[in-house]
Amino acid sequence: MDEDVEQFKTITGVAADHVARGYLEISGGDPMQAIQLFFENPELAASFNAPAASTSASARQPSTARSQHLTGREDASGVIHIDSDDEEDVRMADNEFVVPDDDDDGIAAAVRNAQEEEDAAMARRLQQEMYSENHSLGDGVRAPIAQTTETLAAPDPSWGLDDDREAAVMEQLRRRRRAQGPSANPFNQSSVDWFDVDDGTGPRNPPMPDSSSSSASRRLRDLFAPPTSLMTRLPLDAARDLGKEEKKWILVNLQKLDDFRCQVLNRDHWKNEDLVSLIREHFIFLQYTLDDPLAQSYTTFYFANQAHEDANNYPHASIIDPRTGEQVKVWSGESFPSPAELHRDLVEFLDRYSLAANSKNPVVKTKPKTKPRDIGRMTEEEMLEMALQNSLNEDGGPSEPTVQDPDALTKSIADIGKGKGKAVEEPVDLTGGSAQTPLSPQEAASSAFSQISPTNPHVEPENNPATTTRIQFRHAGGRIIRRFTISDPVRRIYEWLKAEPLEGKEGVQFELKAMPAGRDLIGELNKTIEEAGLKQGTVMIEFIED
């Protein structure tokens, strides 16, 4: 027990043995629990009095000694007289008069004060040990956390800031980026680093890498540097306004810095003299990197479903109409042309398109529909070939870009393959006959349409459910219902529409599609209406206009 008392006093700093014994008695003799109880409830120390032996001895002192502490007096007859100012309670026990002992309260108060002083002294000692300036860091105490300043997020134009405030914030961010110095990577040259933000148009001095970088790194940086002398540093809307004033198209090149194919454009294409001279004369050239804030409007308007994040769409360049903002030409993906091919494409584009007020540019035609392949009629070899092709496209085959060229849809099937190459020699029949090139399906359909008579109007027969039927014809302007004999050939419908064309469609070629499958009826001219499945059916009229 004495060892537990000494252990308790050593850890808690309590000097009184009776306090230590009191906590041990409450804790059932467990010194650890007694120490924990002391720190959790230090006020209990005041409730432990001195040992009972001294207390009982003092209680049995003569009445003469005890009477010195009484607040009243006793006369010769044994009558007790109490002062009127003393409001202490008087307790009678065993025919003896006992008054409250003020010494016990004083002792308890002194114990409490001593305990508080001991606690305060211990707290100061612990504080000095933990936070003293001379305390060694090797004792496991970490150094204070250093103050840091960081930028959590750059501002975004969608936050609705005022123009002046937004410009000031963006300028501050660019200055911070410049203060960090250019990157040592020669392929990490952002379009933001190459222009001053004061005027927003002129290129500034190219950022020089650290002097410690090798000469090879500097040569690579110069070799793959963006064409600042050719570029115009403007937002897309401002570039469109400038293009309308100068009658120039907008040529946009979107760069993905981690794609080497985009870096090749800076090395080969935009430093080609023929391309540079052609672009200076007819185009306003914009080059944005994906981290450039000015690229956000372009990627938002011309890339659907976050397609600008797809690596298959790079390298990427396009031509924008400054008047309407329409994207009229796109080069994207691995099929990006070489410098000579790109120059030829630009020359061809300028021949077909114009910004003159009275010019008529090509319009997008309906993309030719591909007929679905009927798997039930495929042979085993065809099914195996299709499965192999699908497997290559999904696993290891080349992926196609998701951005399509609008200019390709303005060309007819016959125009594809036409160019400035050598003319293909026509085959010659060496036996003396004339060899003829077989017609394509489109040419055959056009030839069959031209052979239909335009002078044979239609007269509706009398209504007879057994021999006649009504056909509904839908077109862009509404619908028409006509009655035909079920034994009439399909050619009769074409003759009616050519002899009695719709209003405003005189002389315009058209196609008839059986709905809902969309089957072209030009190949079923000699079938009867019943055989073609047009009885009580619907036919769509599609006019082919340039």
Image (cartoon, rainbow, N blue to C red):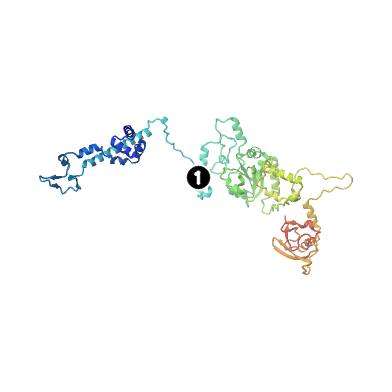
Query: Which residue corresponds to the image point at 80% horizontal and 55% vertical from the top-left?
Result: 447
Residue 296 image point, x, y percent:
57, 46
Identify the residue under disc 1: 169
| Residue 67 in view in this figure | yes
Residue 72 image point, x, y percent:
15, 45
Near-viewer residue (447 or 139): 139
User: How many discs mark residues in the rendered view?
Assistant: 1
- Classed neighbour count for the residue bearing mark 1: other residues with Cα under 10 Å, few (<14), some (14–19), many (≥20): some
Relative side of 187 to 142, left or right: right
Q: Identify whether 138 is placed above or below 28.
A: above
Residue 258 image point, x, y percent:
60, 39
Near-viewer residue (29 or 135): 29
Residue 82 image point, x, y percent:
15, 47
Near-viewer residue (146 or 338): 146
Q: Quadrant of residue 452?
A: bottom right
Query: Outermost residue, right direction?
Result: 432
Q: Identify whether 81 is placed above or below 61.
A: below
Which quadrant, please, contains the N terminus? top left
Q: Identify whether 498 is placed above or below 147.
A: below
Q: Secondary structure at mark 1?
A: helix
Query: Which residue corresponds to the image point at 54% horizontal and 32% vertical from the top-left?
Result: 210
Tell me the amino acid under the disc marked 1.
Val
| Residue 417 in view in this figure | no
